[in-house]
Structures are given as C-alpha cells and as structure tokens.
Amino acid sequence: METVTEKPWLRHYPESIPASINYEIATLQSYLKRAAVNFPDKSALHFMGKEMTYKEVYDNALKLADQLRSLGVSKGDRVAIMLANSPQAVISYYGALFAGAIVVETNPLYVEREIEHQMNDAGAKVMICLDLVYPRIAKVQEKTNLEHIIVTGIKDFLPFPKSVIYPFIQKRNTGLKVEVAYNDHLHSFTDLLKRGEVREIPNDIDPMEDLALLQYTGGTTGPAKGVMLTHYNLTVNTQQCEEWMYKLVPGEEVVLAALPFFHVYGMTTVMNLSIRMAFKMIIIPKFDAKGILKAIEKHKATLYPGAPTMYIGLLNHPNIKTFNLSSIKACISGSAPLPLEVQTTFEEVTNGRLVEGYGLTETSPVAVSNLLWGERRQGSIGLPWPDTDVAVLSAETGEVAKPKEVGEIVIKGPQVMKGYWKRPEETQAAFRGEWFLTGDMGYMDEEGFFYIVDRKKDLIIAGGFNIYPREIEEVLYEHDSIQEVCAIGIPDPYRGETVKAFVVTKEGMDVTKEALDHFARQHLASYKVPQYYEFRDELPKTMVGKILRRVLVEEEKKKAENLSN
C-alpha cells in the first residue's frame, strides 16, 4: 500500500490543535499519582452523595495494589474487573495497574458462558466484582484459572445513612440479597483496603511495550478476542483527546461519567482523561434520564461524553425544559451514528457543542472526530486526530481510493493496538503493514472529512453495544427446536439498531417467540437477546448452502421504506 503523503484534513485544524504532539511517555497510573500530588484535596469523584479527593483515590489504589501483591499478583498477571461505574471501579483499575497487572474489563451483564470464555482466554488470576454478579462467577470459577475473587457492593462507598438503606432498596429492585461467605480465596474489597499499606510498588513497566489492558471485542468469525492495548496506546489517546478538547481547563471541569468504564470509550474519554487533567467525575452507575438531568444541573457538569441513545433519552424526557443544562461545554458522541436532529436539538437545549467521533476498541478507541470548535459537516464522522493517518482502500485495486470513492477505512497511529491476545494469525490478518483494517466501509471527501457508509462485517450496534450475529446464532442453535437461524440488525429509533432473528424450526417441532426469548436470556447478556423473531419455512442461501444474511437485511430495509412511504 502506498504511503499517504497528503493530509487535507490538517488545513481544517484550529491553531490550538497541533498536527503532531510531543507525547509524555508515561504509565496510566502515573496520571493518578500526579493528580494526587498537585490536587490532593480536590474532589476526584462524586458518587450518590459520596465525595472522594484525589489523595483518597490514590491512597486507596495503592492499598489495593499492596493487597493484590499479597495475593500473588505480579507484573503481567491479569486482573479482571466486573464492576458498574463506581468509586471501586476507579480504585480497582488503577490499583491493578499499580500492582503491575494487566486489566481485563468485564461487562457486568455477562452470563456464565461469556464469563468463562473471557476468564479462560485471558488467563485471569483475580476477579474484582459486584456482589450482585458474584453468583454467576461462582458457578464457573472452577472451570477457570481464577484463584481469588474480591467482592464489593454499591453500599460500600455510600455515605451514611445511604450505606444502611441501600441494601434494602437493592433487594426490593432486584429481588436479590447476596450473602458472601469470605475465605482464603474469597475476599471483601473493603477489608482488603483496611489492611493495605499506602506504598508504591516497583514494577519496572515499559509504557511503550507493556500491556495495560486486555479489552475484549467480539467478531463475526469466532468468539470474543482480547485487544492488547499498551500504556502508550491508552495514554497517547488520552493526550490526543486533551488536545482536541483544548478549551477544557485542567483542574476545573466537571465530567458526567455515565459511559461505562468497562467499555474502552468510557475508560479513555471519561476516566483516563479526567484523572490526567484532574477533573471531577460525577459517577453514574446506570443510565437514568431524570437522574442525569438532575446531576448536570446540580453539579454544573461541563463535559458529557456519551452515545446517541443517551442524548435521545434525555431529549425525550418530558420535563427536560425544567432543568438548567447551560453548564455543558462539550459532548463527544460515539459507538453509533449520531442523528442530525439529536445533535441540533441537544445543542439548542444546552448551548454546548455535541459532535460525533469514530473509533474502535483496536484504536484505544478514538481515531476520528468532528471539531468541537470549528467546521463540521453533516453526516461526516469528522477529521483524523493528531498523528493519526486514515485512508480508504479501493475495493477494486486495494490501493488508496480517490476522494468520494467508497472502500475500507484503514488507520495508522500511535493509539493502534499491539494485536490480538494469543491470536497471531488474526493479528496478521487485521493489518496491512502498519495500517489497521477496520472492516468499515466509507469514503473521504476532497477536504479530508470522512464518512461511514456501511459495515463490511455484520456487526450490530444497539445502544452503543457491539453485538455479533454469530454469537446469537450459536446460542439459538443449541435449542432443540431450531434447524436454521440468522440474526441481523434492524433499525430502531432509540437504540440505533436492535436484533432480529429469522428462524426455521425442525420438522414436526414447534416453538414460541416467548420460549426462545426465555432460552436466549439464559445464555446471552440482555442487550444481545433478539427483540424480534420471524419464523420461516426456509432461509435464502447460496448454491453451496451458505445463508444469505444480506438478503434478509435488504428485505427488512424495503419493509421499512414501504412503511415510511
């Protein structure tokens, strides 16, 4: 592939954004140490009435690191974190890094099968989890390499009297009251912190080479795979984010932390950026439109990275006009396309700026974004970030495409992953030289603005979550009544896309939609469960018997068009 020498996007950069950055070579945890030294008494986070200063977060992270070492964790060991947004999620992340470990973020919605696969693939030694998800982990622990489980509850970091009341509210809302019998391999998070020492642990980490994170992402051709991201990958993307949002003031901004930290988008644009720049995070454990509107008004939030469904949820709240949202300065939307009307309306309501960005887990994640304070174009995902080369490969020639010619988007930059964990062949297939092949189809216009037009892979993006059809199909194929199944994404006004499954039952057998829904929920996280089922006598196939997924997608598009006409 030829080298990209022309970078037309640079002409649109404001003077405040450099084309290239002189990066600080550092570990992620050094950001927390520096914030604790420079802003020891500044509030680092607010969580349901609980405030923690930067010194308190730093001290707790060191205490946890001390205790992780006592449990046998050493440099390069994998520590899994299965937590909702909370003080514990922040402390666990940086505590694991201070111990020299590699973090394995795990979605709290995962069911036993998904947990088992991820723990075995990563070879995780320790899991830090919420009490509500512990029963799921307990069921598969013996099938994994997990030696220690550390359990915490939301109540553990709530102020009095909320800490006393919350367990009763939790039981009422979930119907669960989890009792944990602690032992030598099952530990209380708060007890470990009480025993831990505030001391730094020498671990000789090389930010350029050593991994900070295994972030799992699925694929249409097999089970979820671990994306290897180094300290350098993640710190670089954080510094790029800082330069892109150049009007934000270190030590002064208030960030609404509603994006999950277990997703690399929330990890970088919310947690890592906030810690680097000593912002205050207003931590939201679960999206709730009214709660977020109240939080913006009460705490005067200035930065709110999110997904389109989050902004749609706020705009659809019947009382949105009764809240003062004028503190908002900037919002970057990711994970799914941002509808123009959502962008326009949200900016009218807040007087802040809302722009769309683009990236992948493999790019730490942000590679392209519209300018917050500068030119933007309708339908565009924006311009490549500093030191980031983006090109489009022609489907016909395999070389760099001409402007407006559709092809596969490829990315080269310091935030691009090291590779896939224990998958050298898949790593090799994902690159062409130094260029990462995104699998997304799009084009660049003459001015250097990029556009996404289709997805080369059959990825479904629902509510910001990546859903891979093959995983859904493999689960449904386990049902005794199913002969053939094909899952696709169909348009959804709120989630962007939702899952629809086409089913052919075995001869002489019958099954209801309700039965399939019940079965799927036992084996899949809730956001992956199909919302719609359509039963057919047969599915469209090629001559060799391969199901034609694209035909089904086109049929659904035509149905939607006919309904709108």
Image: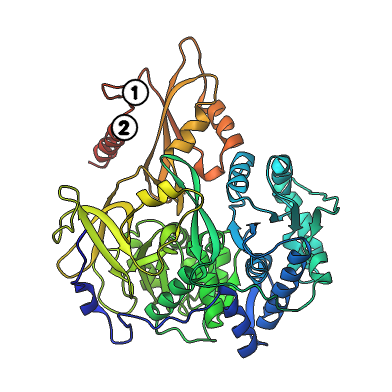
Residue 314 image point, x, y percent: 47, 62
Q: Are marks 2 and 1 in contact (CB under 8 Å)?
A: yes
Amino acid type, label 2 = Leu
Dot 1 falls on a residue whose secondary structure is loop
Q: Is residue 218 visible?
A: yes
Give residue 411's quadrant in the image.
bottom left
Q: CA distance from mark 2 to mark 1?
A: 9 Å
Residue, disc 1 = 539
Left or right placement of residue 50 versus residue 465 in this view:
right
Q: Nearer the viewer, residue 535 or 238?
A: 238
Residue 169 image point, x, y percent: 75, 55
Give residue 359's quadrant in the image.
bottom left
Residue 448 image point, x, y percent: 20, 69
Q: Nearer the viewer, residue 60 or 25?
A: 25
Amino acid type, label 1 = Leu
Q: Is residue 258 above or below residue 32?
A: above
Instruction: Say which label, 2 or 1, has the lower sequence index.
Output: 1
Which residue is situated farthest in the top direction here? 508
Q: Nearer the viewer, residue 452 or 113?
A: 113
Residue, disc 2 = 552
Q: Is residue 82 visible?
A: no
Q: Is residue 558 above or below residue 183?
A: above
Number of marks in the image? 2
